[in-house]
């Protein structure tokens, strides 16, 4: 993490990452990875994603929203902030839970809460203060993301609204960015989220960002990320599972 303000000297950029309960995480990897290995991989990918996001000079903080104590402990250890997932309505569908968690955490990061300092001068009113806090909602499983990719995506995102980075499949959302806007994040993650974010007004960002776009859901995605070069935590887990180190690279 470097300087905490954008070029105009008046912006705070906060990255927000959601991680669900580890017992339910990465079910699509179950055929090729045991439950303990999936847990190690999820935590390692989270660590590499947080480290790469934290190294972006305009990023002020990285917050992980999760209901899972081990995820929370890992996040704190690597320097992220933790937002406890709010108690949820059991009737919510899984994607609604994810979006509820993102929306609640984003609201607190922008508007503050009892005891939470939003970190900006609230002179001019809460809406003006919130407008100075930009949010990058980011997938947790981007082990091949380079900091420069995220920096470019943020720099290219539009002011006054939401922008998105479509994932490598072309259907999902790797990142949703809210910049210089009085509006809320309004996350619509889940199946077909790229289309839903676009239809709801978010602008698709154009850029050659293979690592940023590569969210890992399947064993093929793990192989793709490994070929592209994963961060050190993910490389260490894959190495321990017998994967060759040849393709490993840094996330600079
Ligand atoms: N805090 C929080 N994060 C969630 C929730 N549901 C999903 N996520 C996270 O959002 C991202 C995408 O979620 P999914 O694709 O549903 O789950 P996954 O663990 O990546 O993969 P599968 O189990 O194979 O679907 C992952 O980082 C999840 O950990 C939730 O209810 N709360
Ligand atoms: C939740 C999403 O991703 P995935 O299910 O691919 O992890 C999404 O792209 O909105």
Image (tube, rainbow, N blue to C red):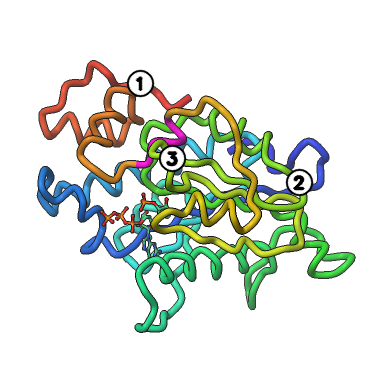
Residue shown at 27%/19% (left/top)?
247
Residue 32: x, y in percent?
11, 43
- Which mark identifies residue 159? 2
Pointer 1 or 2: first along the chain: 2
Any atom of ligand 1 within 8 Å of the CB at mark 1?
Answer: no
For the residue pair 203 and 149, the one nearer the viewer reads as 203
Residue nearest the observer in this picture, 127 or 72: 127
The numbered mark, 3 or 2, whose residue comes first in the sequence reads 2
- Identify the residue at image location x=30%, y=36%: 233
For discs 1 and 2, the disc positioned in front in the rendered view? 2
Residue 115 quadrant: bottom right
The residue indicated by pointer 3 is 170
- In what element is the residue under mark 2? loop
Label 2 CB sits under 8 Å from any ligand 2 atom: no
- On residue 249, the disc is 1
Q: Is residue 48 above or below residue 66?
A: above
Number of the front mark, 1 or 3? 3
Q: Which residues are magenta?
A: 211-215
User: How many numbered circles are shown?
Assistant: 3
Main SS category, magenta section: helix
* Secondary structure category for the residue under label 1: loop
Characterize the local packing of mark 1: few (<14), some (14-19) or many (20 or more) Cα atoms within 10 angstroms.
some
Residue at horizontal 51 percent and vertical 51 percent from the top: 195
Q: Could you tell me residue 112's position as x and y percent?
A: 67, 69
Residue 208 located left or right of residue 161: left
Q: CA distance from mark 1 to mark 2?
A: 33 Å
In front: label 3 or label 2 = 3
In space, the residues marked 3 and 2 are separated at their CA atoms by 24 Å
- Is 221 on the left or on the right of 148, as rendered? left
Q: Is residue 212 magenta?
A: yes
């Amino acid at each position: 993490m470097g300087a905490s303000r954008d070029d105009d000297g008046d912006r705070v950029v906060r990255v927000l990452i959601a991680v669900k309960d580890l017992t339910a995480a990465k079910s699509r990897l179950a055929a090729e990875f045991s439950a303990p290995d999936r847990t190690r991989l999820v935590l390692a990918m989270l660590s590499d994603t947080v480290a790469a996001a934290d190294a972006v000079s305009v990023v002020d903080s990285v917050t992980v929203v999760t209901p899972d104590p081990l995820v929370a402990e890992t996040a704190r250890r690597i320097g992220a902030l933790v937002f406890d997932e709010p108690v949820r309505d059991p009737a919510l569908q899984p994607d609604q839970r994810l979006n509820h968690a993102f929306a609640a955490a984003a609201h607190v990061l922008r508007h503050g809460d009892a005891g939470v300092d939003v970190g900006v001068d609230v002179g001019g009113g809460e809406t003006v203060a919130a407008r100075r806090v930009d949010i990058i909602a980011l997938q947790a499983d981007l082990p091949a993301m380079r900091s420069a990719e995220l920096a470019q995506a943020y720099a290219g995102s539009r002011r006054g609204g939401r922008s998105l980075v479509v994932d490598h499949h072309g259907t999902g959302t790797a990142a949703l960015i809210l910049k210089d806007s009085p509006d809320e994040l309004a996350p619509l993650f889940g199946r077909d989220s790229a289309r839903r974010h676009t239809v709801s007004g978010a602008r698709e960002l154009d850029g050659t960002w293979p690592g940023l776009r590569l969210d890992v859901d399947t064993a093929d995605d793990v192989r793709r990320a490994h070929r592209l070069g994963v961060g050190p935590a993910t490389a260490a887990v894959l190495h321990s599972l017998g994967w060759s180190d040849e393709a490993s690279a840094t996330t600079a």
